Amino acid sequence: MTAELKEISFSLLKKLCEKVGPSGFEDEVRNIVVNEIEQYVDKLWIDAMGNVIGLKKGEGGGKVMIAAHMDEIGLMINAITSDGFLRFVPIGGWNERIVPGQRVLIRTLDGKIFRGVIGVKPPHIMKPEEAQKVLALSELFIDVGASSKDEVEKMGVTIGSVAVFDRTVERLANPDVVTGKSFDDRAGVVAMILAARMLANVKTDVDVYFVATVQEEVGLKGARAAAFSIAPDFGIAIDVTIAADVPGVAEHERFTYLGKGPAIKIMDGRAGSGVIVSPAVVKLITEVAKEEGIPYQIEVLSGGTTDASAMQIAREGIPVGVISVPTRYIHSAVEVLHLDDLVNTARLTAATVKKVNRKWIEENLRRIVK
Ligand SMILES: [Zn+2]
């Protein structure tokens, strides 16, 4: 069972993460999500923002929204030099230090894909002070092998074209541990699809809305719109979280560990500015993990946040929880996760949804005092 699920999760990761889908340009990823989730839901639609929303009807009333974001960080071409190089600005949160020397995939406005590289000066000709310096994104450029602006534009690459890391998803020496780009948050999308699969032949009390959201990396925008239209009784975001269980990081700053199970979030963002998760939802998810024998970690993160932050303050306020996949090197081209954590994230999500009913919602989330 677990071995089969691990294989399915690996092939879904490969399908989803090798696509080009920065915020606002999620089309290729969206098409795959639609194909993969359609068989598990009663209704499926794409809203005006571009979110994919799949509804599995329940029998007892109440609504739960599951959100995982399809977009990834990217670059947007903002200028083409006369000698045919592309200048760019960031989409989402980039670490400048890991950008030079990368291969990228460029997507034109009409959806054509080209390969390019981010040029880097050889050490032979670097001045000592240059070797010490981190180059700003505005100092870097993409080389597509063209020799003039005209040649670039003839390819269809224009201002407004976007680019992402060019990486396939591969197994490491330990075949349960995999690497690739955009695990943030297509790993969450994989877990959501797997959870829908696990629930396919199960009757749930609540209506379950599986939402693959857009534009999370640029301000949690898709989730905000979807939460408004769905108006769920509570929401769960599935996202990656930081596993800093590597050399050079103090034990109390590691947040989560690879292979030790999905993380149940308590708080994120600087000083709690992201989300402080609803205690009743934390209690529910934790109890379900114990009942099902699913390993888990409790997560208190000091930076970054997820779609749960937007869901929580949608409409008149929506209680939220977050289930995270511990992931190393987030927002790089070599993100790393453990397939056991991915499968267990799906199991925990599915089991949590199964456990919820109208009575639990009424007793735990909104209380009438008088
Ligand atoms: Zn994310």
Image (cartoon, rainbow, N blue to C red):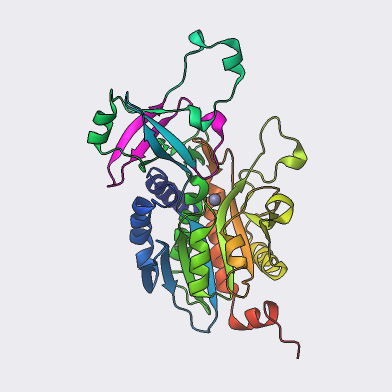
Magenta residues, start to end: 91-118
Left or right position of 130 against 213? right
Of all residues, the one furthest to the top in this rendering is 124
Decide: is 6 above or below 125.
below
Q: Judge by depth and name the residue closer to the eye, 298 or 137.
A: 137
Residue 354 visible here? yes
Decide: is 12 above or below 100.
below
Residue appearing at x 65%, y 79% in the figure = 360
Residue 348 visible here? no
Q: Judge by depth and name the residue closer to the eye, 212 or 282.
A: 212
The location of residue 61, given as percent across then percent down, is 53, 83
The location of residue 209, given as percent across then percent down, is 47, 70
Left or right position of 67 against 286? left
Let me know if residue 99 is in the magenta part: yes
Left or right position of 126 against 156? right
The location of residue 67, given as percent across then percent down, is 51, 62
Q: Judge by depth and name the residue closer to the eye, 348 or 213.
A: 213
The location of residue 267, given as percent across then percent down, is 70, 56
Residue appearing at x 28%, y 25% in the figure = 148
Quadrant in the picture for the C terminus: bottom right
Let me know if residue 237 is in the magenta part: no
Left or right position of 156 against 309? left
